[in-house]
Image (spheres, rainbow, N blue to C red):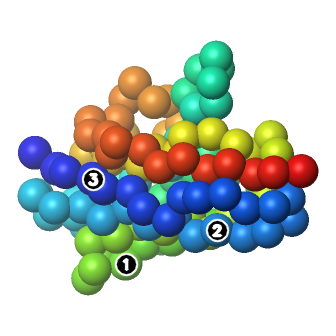
Amino acid sequence: QVSLVESGGGLVQAGGSLRLSCTASGRTFSNYNMGWFRQAPGAEREFVARISYRGATFATADSVKGRFTISRDNVKNTVYLQMNSLQPEDTAVYYCAAAANYYGGRAASYDYWGQGTQVTVSS
């Protein structure tokens, strides 16, 4: 079992920045590929970014490319999402997720999820 706790969400004006953190406990964090997803009201959960278990490879969705960066610190058992140039359409609940044997953007293939953190971007 892996427990994930997100933090760092909040209210920010358009053009601003936030850094989300997701800290894991339980099993060995460095064994898991990690992902960030988001879900806006009335919308499906959407892939945002992923990073491999050692941090050697990563990818971001086209909608956030060039603005969001994913990273991880396996000593601190934490994955980060640095979000710059935020826009109102980035408003959503952001979730981190862990996958033992999957590296991709499909939410259903992730094994563990955090409770989410709200990000609201005002115009």
How much space separates mark 1 and mark 3, taking CA atoms?
Answer: 14 Å
Using the numbered discs, state the Cα–Cα distance from disc 1 to disc 2 in whole angstroms.
18 Å
Task: Give percent across and percent down for residue 86.
Answer: 79, 58
**Nearest-to-viewer mark from 1 and 2:** 2
Position of residue 123 measured from the top left corner of the image (x, y, whole percent): 89, 50
Image quarter of residue 90: top right
Residue type at mark 2 is Leu
Picture disc at residue 18: 2
User: Viewer-nearest of labels 2 and 3?
Assistant: 2
Residue 40 versus residue 77 in the image, above or below: above
Q: Which residue is mark 3?
A: 4
Q: Name the residue rendered at 86%, 65% in the picture.
A: 15
Instruction: State the CA–CA distance, disc 2 to disc 3.
Output: 19 Å
- The 10 Å Cα crowd at callout 2, few under 14, some 14 to 19, many 20 or more, is some
**Residue identified by numbered label 1:** 73
Q: Position of residue 118 (x, y in %)?
A: 54, 47
| Dot 1 or dot 2, earlier in sequence | 2
Asked whether 112 or 5 is in front, the reply is 5
Residue 35, x across and y down, in percent? 46, 49
| Viewer-closest of 50 and 76 | 76
User: What kind of residue is marked 1?
Assistant: Asp
